[in-house]
Image (spheres, rainbow, N blue to C red):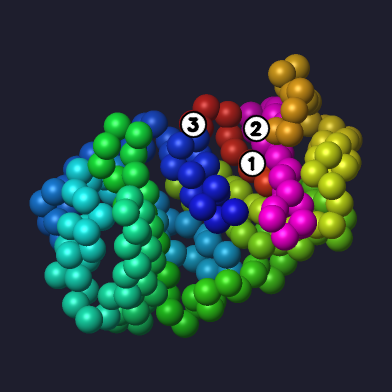
Amino acid sequence: MRRCLCALLLSCGPWVWGDVFLRRPADIPSSWERAYHTDIAFQNSKGELELFRSWDSVDLIRIALQNQHGDQLAFVAGEIMGWGLVIEKGSLIRYLVQPLPEGGSWIVRIKEPLRRAGKPGDLPHRHQLDDLPIYPQSIPTFYSHDQGNQVSVEISECNASPAEALNALSQMVEAAGWTPSPINTGGFQVFVKGEKVAFLGAQRGKDGRTRILRLHKPLGVK
C-alpha cells in the first residue's frame, strides 16, 4: 500500500506546477537535479521533503549516497527501485528511488529530527486529516501534509468492504456540504467545496482489510 501511495504522490499528487523547478544545489551529485522542496508533516513527525531527478542507474545512485553518507547509509537496491536509511547529526533521513516512465529515476528524500521520528511501521496516533469526515471505527495508518501547498493525504484501515466504506463515507462527505463530481462512477470519488477538492478511494488489501484513501487539496493544485 505504501508503494501505491508513493506512486500516487509522484504521478498525480501534491506538486504545484509553479513550485516545481529543476536546479542543482551544491551539496548533491552533479547528475542530480532538484525538482521540488517543501516542509511536510509526516506520520507523527514534521520534516523536510526533497524530490530529485536523475538519469543514473539505481546502483550509481547508491554509490552517490554512500559517497555522501559513508557507512551510516543502509541501502537496499532492486533492479529499478531502491530504499535507503541514514541516521546522521541528530536526523533520520529516508530515501526512495522510483523509475520514471521516460527513463531515469525520481529520488525522494525525507529528513526529520531523530528524536521525533517513529520506528519503521509505527502508525499515526490519531486521525490528522480533519477537513473531511472520518469513517467510523477506521484506524489511521499513514498521514502526510505538504505545508507548501496544503495538500493532505491520509490512509486508514477498516473491516468493511470497499464498496460499503466508500458509499458510507461519500454520504458523510456530501452531508458535510461537499458537492460530488458528475463523473463519480467507480471506486474513486471526487468532491468540491468552495475552493477545495476532496478525493476518496477504497481498496481491499491482501490481508482482507480495506484501505481508505482521503485526499484534501486546494483547487488548482496538480
| Disc 3/disc 2 C-alpha distance (Å) | 11 Å
Amino acid type, label 1: His
Taking the spot 65% from the left edge, 33% from the top edge, the residue there is: 196
Secondary structure type for disc 2:
strand
Residue 106 is at least partly visible in this image = no
Left or right of 4? Residue 164 is: right
- Give the labeled residue for mark 1: 216
Image quarter of residue 91: bottom left
Give the spatial CA distance, label 2 vs label 1. Answer: 6 Å
**Residue identified by numbered label 3:** 222
Range drawn in magenta: 189-212
Q: How many neighbours does mark 3 have within 10 angstroms: few (below 14), some (14-19), or many (20 or more)?
A: some
Label whose residue precedes the other's in the sequence (1 or 3): 1
3 or 2: tag closer to the N-terminus = 2
Q: Position of residue 131 (x, y in %)?
A: 71, 46
Q: Is residue 29 visible?
A: yes
Q: Residue at x 34, y 67 (%)?
A: 76
Residue on which the image places disc 2:
197
Q: Earlier in the sequence, mark 2 or mark 1?
A: 2
Callout 1 secondary element = strand
Label 2 crowd (10 A; few <14 / some 14-19 / many >=20)? many
With 177 as the anchor, is 200 left or right in this view? Answer: left
Residue at x-position 44% and y-position 42%: 10
Whether residue 80 sits left or right of residue 4 in the image: it is: left
Q: Is residue 194 above or below residue 94?
A: above
Above-or-below relation of 165 to 85: above
Amino acid bearing label 3: Lys
Disc number placed over residue 34 in the picture, else none: none
Q: Is residue 96 left or right of residue 208?
A: left
